[in-house]
Every structure is written in C-alpha cells, then in structure tokens.
Image: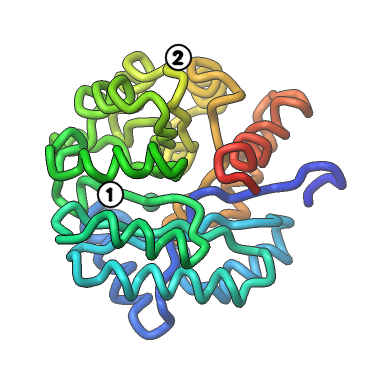
C-alpha cells in the first residue's frame, strides 16, 4: 500500500531459482543488450514489498524448450504457495510441446492464473499455426495470456501478428507487455488501441520516454487498459513505481492502473 490508499500490484515479474538466477538474468541481458538492476530472486521481491509498498507481484518464467515447461510451472507454483499471498503465479507453455492441452490442465491444477508467452525468446511468430491450440484452449478456459510484444530487430511479436489473433479469439484476454510493442511503442499504440480483449502493461518502457509522452501513451490505450508492471529484475520496481506516481493522473486513474485492471483480469 502506498500513500495510505493505493493497493499496488506489479503485474510483470520474472523469477528464477536461486541457483540459476544470475545465469538466467545474464541471458536476458545479452538478448536485450541491457544490464538488469536486480537479480531475479524471490527474496528480493519480498524485500521490495516491504521497502516500496508493493502488495502483490505477478510472477512468471519462460520455457525455452518444451521439456522445461513442467518444472518451471512447478517452481512458479511452489514459490506462489510459499509467498503467503504476495505472488500470483503465471505459467509457461511452449508451442512445440506434444501435449499442449495436458500442459494447460497441469498449469491450472497448480493454481496458476494465466500464461506468459515470449515469442522473441521462444522463437515463434504470434500467428504461427503451432500456437493456435494455445489460444483456443486459453480462450475456452478463461486463462489470460501475458504476451511479450514488440522488437524492432525481429518479426515474431509485432502488432501485425497479434491483431488477427485478437480478432479471431475474441474471448481471449491478452496483456501486451511493454505497452504492446517494445521498441516500436508508437506504432503499436496506433495499431492496437481500442481492442476489447487487449490490455497492456507499462514495463520496460519508462526509460525511453518523458513524463508527457508516457501520459500520452497511457491515454491512447485508456487508463482502464493499462497495468502497472516492471519487468523485474530488469528494472527496480521501487524506482518504476516512483516514476509512475509522479505522473499527473487522478486517484481513480491510479487505482485502475496500479491494481484494479490486474485484479479484474486475473480474478484476484
Ligand atoms: Zn516478461
């Protein structure tokens, strides 16, 4: 809770087992050419909760092979279980799995509340036929998908590939990370705003913009369409939250972005 009245959910956090955290973070850093400011350990999130007043974290991890799916989902579920309500767990899937339906059943049985997909790291195009089964079942089961979106170096997760999927699977809720298009922010906002089953989070984006530009981006999607998220461990959730709280939004608008939109989507 911050300022005594805002319940805060960080809706985009990557976590890793202690033993592999530094290697996993180094891998993402190399992919994006950045240096993460945090380590990716769950203990850090617990500390941030105390020091920054963040009440809840949506936690996830991405499988780069189908074989990793069950163990990653078990890890996320165990950490969520141990967190005493601090974490909401989101599972991973891989389009090359031989049993996507089974993987989704397992993920639901573990109590996970959604699915994280990362087309650029998992190497599939959003509109690849291999993914259609995922979308179909997630739509049917009411599982939201947190989708990495956007990369000006590749053609895996850009708006032209996402838009037809949102149109076909109208009952599927998708949250486009990084304002719907990392490194192609403006283009994504023009293409993807005003779509009923589409939300965005604000993670890994503030660094690129002035306050005025962030406000404009949020208003393009609408305050009822944007979730506060930080892409931990890439950024400091405390610093990102401070930046957000300095933006000129009123209390009702802040409440939507800081928690209410995420609560609605994940049924929290
Ligand atoms: Zn992510």
Which corner quadrant of the image does residue 205 belong to? top left
* Quarter residue 211 falls in: top right
Determine the secondary structure under disc 2: loop
Look at mark 1 in the image and give the residue it sits on. Answer: 118
Residue depicted at x 73% and y 66%? 50
- Give me the residue at 44% from left, 34% from top: 173
Q: Which residue is mark 2?
A: 194
Where residue 261 appears, as percent x and y from the top left, is 61, 34
Task: Identify the residue at image location x=33%, y=25%.
Answer: 166
Q: Is residue 47 above or below residue 31?
A: below
Q: In the image shown, does 45 or 60 lie closer to the viewer?
A: 60
Q: CA distance from mark 2 to mark 1?
A: 23 Å
Q: Residues within 10 Å of mark 1 (few under 14, many from 20)?
A: many
User: x, y percentage for residue 84?
Assistant: 68, 71
For disc 1, does the CB lie below 8 Å from ligand 1?
yes
> Would residue 10 be found to the left or right of residue 28 on screen?
right
In the displayed structure, 216 sits above or below 161; it is: above
Q: Nearer the viewer, residue 205 or 123?
A: 123
The number of numbered discs placed on residues in the rendered structure image is 2
């Amino acid at each position: 809770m911050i300022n005594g009245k805002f319940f805060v959910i960080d809706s985009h956090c990557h976590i890793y087992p202690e033993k592999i955290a530094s290697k996993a973070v180094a891998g993402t850093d190399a992919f994006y050419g950045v240096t993460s400011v945090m380590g990716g350990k769950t203990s850090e999130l617990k500390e941030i909760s105390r020091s920054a007043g963040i009440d809840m974290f949506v936690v996830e991890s991405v499988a780069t092979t189908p074989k990793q799916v069950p163990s990653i989902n078990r890890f996320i579920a165990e950490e969520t279980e141990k967190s005493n309500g601090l974490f909401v767990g989101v599972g991973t899937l891989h389009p090359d799995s031989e049993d996507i339906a089974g993987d989704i059943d397992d993920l639901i049985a573990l109590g996970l509340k959604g699915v994280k997909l990362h087309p650029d790291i998992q190497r599939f195009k959003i509109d690849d036929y291999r993914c259609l089964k995922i979308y179909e079942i997630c739509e049917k089961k009411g599982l939201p998908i947190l989708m990495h979106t956007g990369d000006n170096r590749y053609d895996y997760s850009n708006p032209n590939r996402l838009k037809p999927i949102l149109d076909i699977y109208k009952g599927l809720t998708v949250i486009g990370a990084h304002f719907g298009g990392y490194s192609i922010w403006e283009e994504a906002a023009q293409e993807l705003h005003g779509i009923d089953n589409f939300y965005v989070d604000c993670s890994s984006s503030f660094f690129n913009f002035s306050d005025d530009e962030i406000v404009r981006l949020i208003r393009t999607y609408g305050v009822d369409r944007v979730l506060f998220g930080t892409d931990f461990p890439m950024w400091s959730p405390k610093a990102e939250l401070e930046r957000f709280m300095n933006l000129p939004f009123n209390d009702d608008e802040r409440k939507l972005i800081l928690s209410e939109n995420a609560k609605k989507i994940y049924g929290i």
